[in-house]
């Protein structure tokens, strides 16, 4: 219920977003008509269409996005015709003549057609195909959840509730607008003038959408930004991972029972082990570690999980790494197997490509550790990095409670190398930053051409935590793909480490690159995947450590230039 309310409020706030501007002329085109027969059916058609298209786009992959592009073109044609009929009654008669037999005239001269419920629904469907709301924190949360959990009634319901919130605020605006138009008609006799103005506005809306302003400029230029309000609402109902992590139990304090051990049957495959079941694990203490191999926080916790496994595996502990992918390429079993081998993971790994185990635990974080006693009960959890000594105390307590004796003492102290090294603890380091347009923030290269090749230009200067593309790129929901050699990405960051999730092109051909810091070769500040001159090669889909500052965590301007085309760039993370 809380998530439904959050989705509804997020939709209501879209009326304050500039991304609503291109569709407002379509909404107000019939503001002078009865609301129940025109405004309500139109808004219902808009909400249902948006929810359906957004669901398919979030979980269906690129085919749904491209299919919707054709729907958008058809909708633009229909709405352009609507605008023309508003401009000229003679043109309206000519355009609508072929449709008289079907009773679907676009002209507003006919009272019967003007009040047609199905005509209003059709207008709403066309508007829903065109509506591209700004992806603020709430919509981003919904779309991410949809991508993670797949197509379901819950997914569509949340998106429908979001659209219903937008429809509610639009309905209020429509009610007010309709009254204003009625007063103007009565007092000024300006019906024909108003209709022509609406026709011009509809055509302007069509032009704005055709030029991509609804998904580019208006996404970043806000008349009244709602991001802060939306993030406040999210934080009120969903604490950040560090705050959500349960306080560590004190010595002698009983561990609560947090639930039963969910099924592992949803795993799509297993590495390092035959399939494990709850029945086969009875009598064992189990640590379940949710991770994904391109997640820097997961990589930094891996040395501790591996060390616990090696220390306690002969004393009753079973460690299961549940690999729940964040990016599409992490669903490939071969990629995961290669990462497990490269990272030296020796404990059992369950492939959770369908997120069945993730959903069974109601998990929301990478990494997340769940501690299960010998009776199959979840007794403790920890989200994110850190708390390693306290977590090891929990392992020992559960092993002792299960009757295991002569447990090894002390605490593990692994020496993580490269990307697995512990973070320096800089609270001001740059945030995780996604390159794909579904969750991109602080982008400084102008409007994004969704799923189409475009020549981007980086500005001369960047503010802290801003980033930019330069060269010809195609930006997709999860990644940006370089179309021509010589393209680059620039980021003004703060942190000791800079990582970038990268992958080669579809043919798997390696992609050479060179990085600079403040316009110079990195020297001693190079990462494990670059040399002192800044050279490196993308050979597989994974996280690459490109910078590790030898001294401090100061602010720097990072640039990576790709010498070959085809690279896929996914996300920056910092340490």
Image (cartoon, helix red, strand yellow):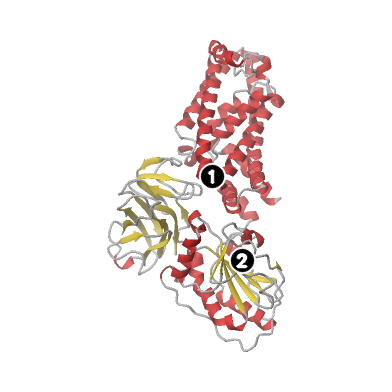
Of the image marks 2 and 1, the number of the one nearer the N terminus: 1
Discs 2, 1 touching: Cβ within 8 Å: no
Residue 169 can be seen, yes or no: yes
Q: Return the residue nearer the eye: 483 or 498.
A: 483
Residue 294 can be seen, yes or no: no
Relative to 244, 529 lies left or right: left
Q: Position of residue 527 (x, y in %)?
A: 36, 66
Q: Return the residue nearer the eye: 87 or 54.
A: 54
Residue bearing the label numbered 2: 245
Relative to 327, 467 lies left or right: left
Residue bearing the label numbered 1: 135
- Measured Cα–Cα span from mark 2 to mark 1: 27 Å
Q: Secondary structure at mark 1?
A: loop
Name the mark on residue 498.
none
**Furthest residue toward top:** 90
Give the answer, above or below, for where 178 lies relative to 1. above
Residue 403 falls in which quadrant of the image?
Answer: bottom right
Give the answer, above or below, for where 474 lies relative to 149. above
Q: Secondary structure at mark 2?
A: loop
Give the answer, above or below, for where 48 lies relative to 297. above
Q: Return the residue nearer the eye: 546 or 320.
A: 320
Tag 2: Cα neighbours inside 10 Å, few (<14), some, or many (≥20)? Answer: some
Relative to 301, 286 lies left or right: right
- Residue at (49% x, 79% y) in the render: 413
**Furthest residue toward front:** 274
**Quarter of the image with the C terminus in it:** bottom left
Q: Position of residue 269 (x, y in %)?
A: 57, 63
- Residue at (58% x, 70% y) in the render: 274
Tag 1: Cα neighbours inside 10 Å, few (<14), some, or many (≥20)? Answer: many
Q: Position of residue 21 (x, y in %)?
A: 54, 32
């Amino acid at each position: 219920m809380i998530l439904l309310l959050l989705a509804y409020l997020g939709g209501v706030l879209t009326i304050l977003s500039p991304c609503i501007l291109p569709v407002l002329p379509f909404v107000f085109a019939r503001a002078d008509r009865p609301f129940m027969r025109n405004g309500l059916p139109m808004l219902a058609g808009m909400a249902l269409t948006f929810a359906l298209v957004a669901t398919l786009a979030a979980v269906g992959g690129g085919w749904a996005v491209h299919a919707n592009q054709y729907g958008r073109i058809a909708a633009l044609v229909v709405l352009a015709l609507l605008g023309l009929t508003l401009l000229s009654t003679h043109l309206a008669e000519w355009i609508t003549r072929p449709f008289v037999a079907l009773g679907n005239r676009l002209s507003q001269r006919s009272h019967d057609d003007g009040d047609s419920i199905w005509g209003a629904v059709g207008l709403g469907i066309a508007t829903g195909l065109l509506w591209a709301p700004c992806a603020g924190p709430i919509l981003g949360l919904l779309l991410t959840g949809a991508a993670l959990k797949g197509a379901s009634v819950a997914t569509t319901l949340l998106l429908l509730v979001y659209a219903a919130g937008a429809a509610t605020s639009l309905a209020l605006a429509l009610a007010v607008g309709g009254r204003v138009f009625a007063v103007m008609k009565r007092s000024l006799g300006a019906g024909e003038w108003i209709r022509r103005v609406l026709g011009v506005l509809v055509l302007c809306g069509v032009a704005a959408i055709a030029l991509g302003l609804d998904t580019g400029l208006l996404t970043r230029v806000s008349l009244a930004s709602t991001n802060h309000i939306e993030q406040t609402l999210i934080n009120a109902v969903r604490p950040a991972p560090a705050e959500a992590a349960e306080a560590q139990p004190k010595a002698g304090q009983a561990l609560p029972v947090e639930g039963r051990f969910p099924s592992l049957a949803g795993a799509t495959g297993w590495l390092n082990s035959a399939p494990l079941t709850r029945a086969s694990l009875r009598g064992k203490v189990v640590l379940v570690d949710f991770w994904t191999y391109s997640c820097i926080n997961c990589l930094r916790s891996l040395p501790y999980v591996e060390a616990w496994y090696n220390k306690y595996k002969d004393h009753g502990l079973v460690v299961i790494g549940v690999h729940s992918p964040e990016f599409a390429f992490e669903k490939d079993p071969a990629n995961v197997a290669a990462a497990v081998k490269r990272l030296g993971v020796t404990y059992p790994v369950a492939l959770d490509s369908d997120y069945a185990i993730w959903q069974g635990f109601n998990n929301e974080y990478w990494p997340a550790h769940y501690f299960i006693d010998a009776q199959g009960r979840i007794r403790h959890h920890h989200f994110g990095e850190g708390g390693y000594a306290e977590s090891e105390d929990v392992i020992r307590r559960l092993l002792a409670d299960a009757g295991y004796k002569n447990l090894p003492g002390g605490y593990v102290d692994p020496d993580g190398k490269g990307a697995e090294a512990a973070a320096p603890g800089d609270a001001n380091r740059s945030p995780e930053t996604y390159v794909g347009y579904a969750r991109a923030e602080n982008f400084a290269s102008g409007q994004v051409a969704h799923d189409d090749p475009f020549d981007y230009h980086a500005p001369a200067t960047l503010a802290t935590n801003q980033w930019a593309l330069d060269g010809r790129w195609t930006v997709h929901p999860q990644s940006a793909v370089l179309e021509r050699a010589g393209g680059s990405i620039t980021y003004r960051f703060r942190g000791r480490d800079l990582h970038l999730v990268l992958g080669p092109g579809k043919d798997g051909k390696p992609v050479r690159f060179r990085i600079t810091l403040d316009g110079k070769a990195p020297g001693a500040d190079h990462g494990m995947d670059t040399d002192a001159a800044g050279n490196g090669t993308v050979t597989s889909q994974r996280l690459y450590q490109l910078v590790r500052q030898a001294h401090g965590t100061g602010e720097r301007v990072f640039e990576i230039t790709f010498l070959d085309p085809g690279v896929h760039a996914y996300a920056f993370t910092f340490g």
